[in-house]
Amino acid sequence: MYDFTHMERYREDGRLEAKLATGGLPESIWESYSAFANAGGGVILLGVEELPDHSLRTQGLLDAGEMLEEFLSLVRDPAVASVDLVSDGRAWVENTGSGDIIVIAVPQADRRCRPVWVGRDPYFGTYHRVGEVDIRCTRDEVDAMLADRATP
């Protein structure tokens, strides 16, 4: 996986998203969660900043345990996320030597669970990942995932 003691080795890409999160759990985490679940999986790091040269640096979180509990509580809420893919040990606090961060390893959702959306509306809350960007899915893309979900 990743060596979190050498964060400078990594860059955001189609499988890695870093969020500073010093002001609390960022709203944009849900778009990344949906995008990774719908497009091959990926890792979200909280407490990590992207520098101007696009390298990553651990900033750390003051109370990573509390933030993790907040995330795990919210991801179980169907009004927040259509499915919980990470409460079974795929999200944890990691001490990097430079501070505590949260690691959320989002697997690709089984086709019977896709699309994975955030909020209550799959047509507004379904995302996929293109490079290092979370993109809202089109109505046709959501319909295709819904149809695939129903196929035996």
Image: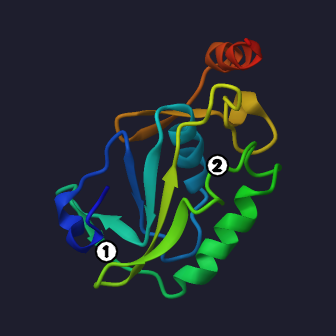
What residue do we see at 69% from left, 38% from top?
Answer: 117
The relative height of residue 48 versus residue 112 in the rendered view (above or below) is below
How many numbered discs sit on the rendered protein?
Answer: 2
Specify the quadrant that holds the N terminus: bottom left
Residue 83 falls in image quadrant: top right
The relative height of residue 98 versus residue 7 in the rendered view (above or below) is below
Pointer 2: what residue? 85
Q: Residue 142: where, in percent of width, then height?
A: 67, 21
Q: Residue 140: where, in percent of width, then height?
A: 65, 12
The label number, if any, that marks residue 28 in the structure image: none
Q: Secondary structure at mark 2?
A: loop
Please state which of residues 29 and 96 is positioned toward the viewer in this rendering: 96
Q: Which amino acid does the dot numbered 2 rest on?
A: Leu
Is residue 71 visible in the rendered image? The answer is yes
Disc 2: CA contacts within 10 A as few (<14), some (14-19) or many (>=20): many
Q: Is residue 26 left or right of residue 98?
A: right
Residue 131 falls in image quadrant: top left
The label number, if any, that marks residue 58 in the structure image: 1
Q: Secondary structure at mark 1?
A: strand
Q: Residue 5: where, in percent of width, then height?
A: 24, 74
What residue do we see at 70% from left, 50% from top?
Answer: 84
What residue do we see at 36% from left, 69% from top?
Answer: 48
Is residue 28 visible in the rendered image? The answer is no
Give yes or no for contact between labels 2 and 1 (Cβ–Cβ under 8 Å).
Answer: no
What residue do we see at 32% from left, 79% from top?
Answer: 96
Q: Is residue 118 left or right of residue 121?
A: left
